[in-house]
Amino acid sequence: MPRTRSDCAPARTSRIALTLLLAALMAACASPASYTEPITKFQKASTIVIESARLEYGAANTYERNAIIDRLASRKQRLGLPDISGPDHEAIGPNDLRARMLALDALAKHGEFLLALASNDASKRSKESAIKLGDSLGRLSESLKTTADSEFKVRASNFGKIAGSAVDFAIQTKITEALNQAIEISDASVSALIRQIRRDMENIYERRRSILSEARVLAINAYNEEVAQPNANSDRIEKAATRVKQTTFAFEKLQLLVGVGPGLDAMTDAHLQLVVYARSTKSPQQLSDLIDAVDVFVARAVIISEAIKAIDRPSKE
Amino acid sequence: MFEFSDHSELVAIIGDVLTDLDYLRTNTTLSPERKQDLDELRDRLDAAQLKLVRDDFEADTAAIQTATQEVKGANEKIRKTIERVDKFASNIETVAKIVSIVERLVGIADGF
């Protein structure tokens, strides 16, 4: 007996419902490719912040050394290498500097690792990220052996220990345990470690302010010496006046510009967003929110990087 | 262990004192001897600030907080009278006190 239209209706309704349900389920899970975007952007922004911090750290000792040379020159005092080298004349020692750079690298790798664990193909993605983070933590751990006992060392070691166990879980494909551990690190250690590096940046800013302040005095003294000469030379006075303008401008400009601190704040915020996402049901909307948050991190990192380049650019006048 | 804010605040306040001291150092009526005294105070405070920055300085919170409050109070006193020539000598005395407080805190042996 042929089927009537009414016989087929319930079966068709079931098929439509099933199709809709499958479509809804598929929509609820982001495709593996969609995780590539936030991971890539997070890497990019982290790299910018780390490079900005490296610039700040790297310039700190140069500023200190140049300040000593300028000071001795203004007093017409002799100069020897012991006057400008060694720990007493550095804002940060080479071992401490290396450890901080490695800590920043490990923090960036941890962010990528967390995101890989939260992705829907975590077992595949997270192993690669875990290996990268493990390498980075190994270098950090070696480096910490050469640094003096300090708050930084305590915080970096704590971070390394917990991150190391998350890496172990991921390599054993224990994704849930690894994710929980990675979230715990972010809650307990990541913010504290970034805050420590931020404090370094604030201190380096203060040293630069003090150095630029003194540079004004040296320039003014040099100017006053020129005008006090019995046969004052106009060219030399003009040159000295230009130096006064340059140093006062550099001092004022420093106070108007931002350092890498806000970049580190942006990195902390991005890490917090990663944690929020990792704890969420990971719907497409939540992934979209995460992408927006990572976009904000990229934008802030780029602005701050430009500001830091401006600080280091010599003034023209 | 100290709080970050205490340490950073102290480094920043020392920076304020150094810039105030620089203002005083450009006074054109200074005698060479007076100028030398100011240069020496400046060098010492600068060295103490650098030491505070370089060493991940450990001191108990109370010592940092006390020093911060003392330096802050002394610097406010300087700021109020920094442009008054008749207060020049007392301002220099205050700077010397600040240098002494900070050197004691960072453990620079000689003191003032």
Image (spheres, coloured by chain):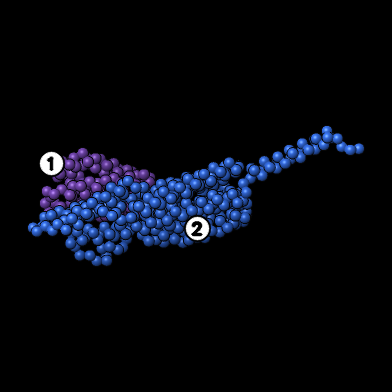
Compared to residue A168, the image places residue A12 above or below, namely: above
Pick out the residue farthest to the bottom. Answer: A80
Q: Which mark is residue A137?
A: 2
- Mark 2: few, some, or many residues within 10 Å (few <14, many ≥20)? many
- Mark 1: few, some, or many residues within 10 Å (few <14, many ≥20)? few
Q: Position of residue A84 (x, y in %)?
A: 27, 62
- Secondary element type, mark 2: helix
Q: Is residue A26 left or right of residue A254?
A: right
- Tell me which chain the residue with mark 1 is part of: B
Q: Position of residue A255 (x, y in %)?
A: 31, 46
Residue nearest the viewer, comparing A220 with B4: A220
Residue nearest the viewer, comparing A250 with A134: A250
**How many marks can you see?**
2
Q: Residue at x 40, y 52 (%)?
A: A305
Q: Given the image, on which type of amino acid does mark 2 rest?
A: Leu
Residues at marks 1 and 2, CA–CA distance in whole angstroms: 60 Å
Q: Residue at x 22, y 58 (%)?
A: A71
Q: Is residue A85 left or right of residue A171?
A: left
Pick out the residue farthest to the top. Answer: A6
Colour assigned to chain B in the rendering is: purple
Q: Residue at x 33, y 55 (%)?
A: A313
Placement of the N terminus of chain A among the 4 image quadrants? top right
Q: Which mark is residue B86?
A: 1
Q: Position of residue B68 (x, y in %)?
A: 29, 44
